[in-house]
Amino acid sequence: MDHNNIIDSTKDWHEDAFDLTRGIAAYTRSPLVARIAKVLAKHPQASIANAFNHKQVACKMWARDELHNAFGGKYQRIWVLGGWYGVLAAMLFDDARFDIGSIETIDLDENVAAIAQTLNGNDPRLIARTCDMYALDYAGGKPDLVVNTSCEHIADVRGWLDMLPGGTRVLLQSNDYYAEPTHINCVSSQDAFERLASLSSVSFAGTLPQKKYNRFMLIGTA
Ligand SMILES: C[S@@+](CC[C@H](N)C(=O)[O-])C[C@H]1O[C@@H](n2cnc3c(N)ncnc32)[C@H](O)[C@@H]1O
């Protein structure tokens, strides 16, 4: 290796990102960052830099903190819908305030389950499923918390909530990031999100401003 060579623009960026994340993992002693390095090596097609960018991480740390404030840290069975690469699941397992029996991260996209497994270090408490959230048996599955931070990606938020047994605890996020083409159901404000979801009880409602958009969150019961 030529140590004087500053940047070799022909080199795949994954190699540098792999070295860097391994270094950051060693320095911070973070098993989660070490597993991001594994994702880079094993699943180079994954948009992990997008899923774990500082805005995504901020939104999920906000979710963790407010969830803990609202309902505490003990859960038997959490379902995370539209769970993508399992970042939220990994961040919940990584947080010592939480005592969680299992997390099912469920996504329509058949390509994401293997990545979620790698990111979660094949933790037996993590179940990665490929399924449409409209096709799940919520009454039979009995999750004690249902998380959907992808409400901007689904057409009928209230129609989906109607599938949950009354009283099910939920954490929901949406945003006003209309410019992103995959966002088919953005909301213009926190009030609009509250009206759309019409939860039977609301323990937390808030807005996290980001540079290009606002993230809205509701925690309560369906
Ligand atoms: C881009 S990702 C997640 C963005 C979100 N802001 C987050 O990180 O929480 C949205 C995910 O929702 C999934 N999705 C969309 N419709 C779905 C459905 N009906 N059931 C399950 N997953 C769905 C997509 O496949 C995608 O992986």
Image: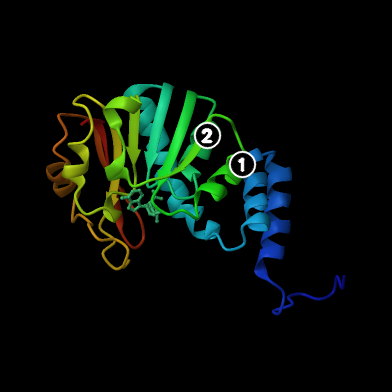
On the rendered image, what quadrant is the N terminus found in? bottom right
| Number of numbered labels in the structure image | 2
Left or right: residue 136 versus residue 86 is left
Q: Quick check: 91 left or right of 108?
A: right
The amino acid type of the residue labelled 2 equals Leu
Q: Which residue is mark 1?
A: 32
Q: Is residue 98 above or below residue 38?
A: above
Separation of marks 1 and 2 at Cα, in angstroms:
14 Å
- Is residue 73 in view? no
Which residue is located at x 64 percent, y 57 percent? 40
Residue 3 locus on image (x, y percent)? 85, 70
Residue at disc 2, secondary structure: strand
Residue density around tag 1, few if under 14, some if 14–19, many if 20 or more, within 10 Å: some
Residue drawn where x is 39% and y is 27% of the image: 68
Name the element at disc 1.
helix
User: Which disc, if any, is residue 126?
Assistant: 2
